[in-house]
Amino acid sequence: MAKILIVDDEVIFATQLEDLIISMGHQSVAYATNADEALEMARDMLPDLILMDIRMPGMDGIDAAERIRKEQDAPIIFMTAYPQDEFVGRAKTLAPLGYLIKPVSSEQIRPTIEMALHKRALDKALEKAYAELENRVQERTVELREMNQALQDEILEKDRINRLLLEKEQALKISAENLEETNGALKILLKHRKEELLQLEEKIIANIREFILPYLDKLKTTKLNETQLTYLGIVETNLQDVTAPFTPRISPRYMSMTAADIQMINLVKQGKKTREIADILDKKEGAVAQRRIRIRSKTGIKGKKANLRTHLMGIQ
């Protein structure tokens, strides 16, 4: 049931029009006799439709309708007994839903009101649908913004993780390179240490054979009693036991040398001549010369024009 406001200064016409509208099933009907009353009643009842007479005392219906439209979007049907172009032109600016020429019959007013109310209902439904659509668009816009923000945050997080992974990868690469360099340095150090140990073992063996064993051999040739010979054998055996673990790792140039050879090599390296060596070792010069030849053979320079002392100094 629609709320309809009738505005007309002719009370009889307004009353008849009210009865007609009520007969159409619309119970909320009111009427005003001038523009001021119309403005006040429109504010109070918020009508679904206004039937507005154009010509009234004081403010005319077009001006009144214009003021009402500024406050609310009420549809209007103008009524007038003066269909001058002036009124029609002014009324058009308000986009009325109808323009009726008095006297108005029930055959005219009924379909005009029904069509106006139908259009009003359609407009409201459209406004509601538009508002709902606007709300859905806004809600969807908010959702899309949130999704977009979440996606951007996810991208930023992935970028951050990728940067961290890249930094860690670079750090691991640098660590691997440093570790490789460290391993290389350790290998070199271990190699040097092994060589130093081997040299130390060789030196120990050489010193024992050069400075100890020859004199043990000399002691054997002296007049020793049985006990002394026993002790001498024990010393010699112990020395062999001490040097035994080193023997497999000793340089081949010492393995083939006897204690007498090493003693001779040491004297040659000291720059001693054959006669001087013979005197020191209490040997004949021929025997010393023969041993020198054997040493040249063992060191690989037999038959070559190479100085024995220079060669021995080079390989030691």
Image (spheres, rainbow, N blue to C red):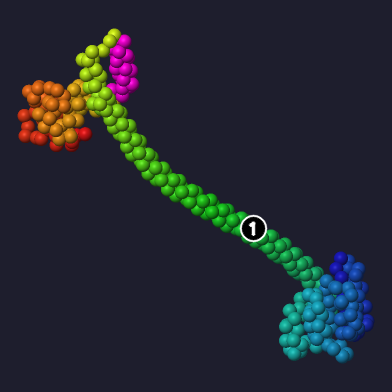
Q: Quadrant of residue 269?
A: top left
Who's the residue at 92% across and 73% down the image?
Answer: 19
**Considering only vertical position in the picture, is 287 above or below 140?**
above
Instruction: Pick whichever, 312 or 236, lies toward us.
Output: 236
> Is residue 212 in view?
yes
Q: Report the amino acid beneath label 1.
A: Glu
Question: Label 1 neighbourhood size at 10 Å, few (<14), some (14-19), many (20+)?
Answer: few
Please indicate whether residue 304 sits to the left or right of residue 170 in the image.
left
Report the span colored magenta: 227-247
Please indicate whether residue 157 sits to the left or right of residue 1 in the image.
left
**Considering only vertical position in the picture, is 239 above or below 51?**
above
Please indicate whether residue 217 sits to the left or right of residue 297 in the image.
right
The percent coordinates of residue 203 (x first, y second) are 28, 30
* Count of numbered marks: 1
Who's the residue at 33% across and 21% down the image?
Answer: 242
The percent coordinates of residue 244 (x first, y second) are 31, 20
Q: Quadrant of residue 122?
A: bottom right
**Considering only vertical position in the picture, is 177 above or below 232?**
below
Who's the residue at 7% across and 23% down the image?
Answer: 286
The percent coordinates of residue 136 (x first, y second) are 69, 60
Query: Label 1 belongs to which residue?
Result: 146
- Disc 1 element: helix
> Is residue 298 in view?
no
Of the 4 image quadrants, the one containing the N terminus is: bottom right
Q: Quadrant of residue 68?
A: bottom right
Please indicate whether residue 297 sits to the left or right of residue 160 in the image.
left
The question of residue 72 being in magenta is answered with: no
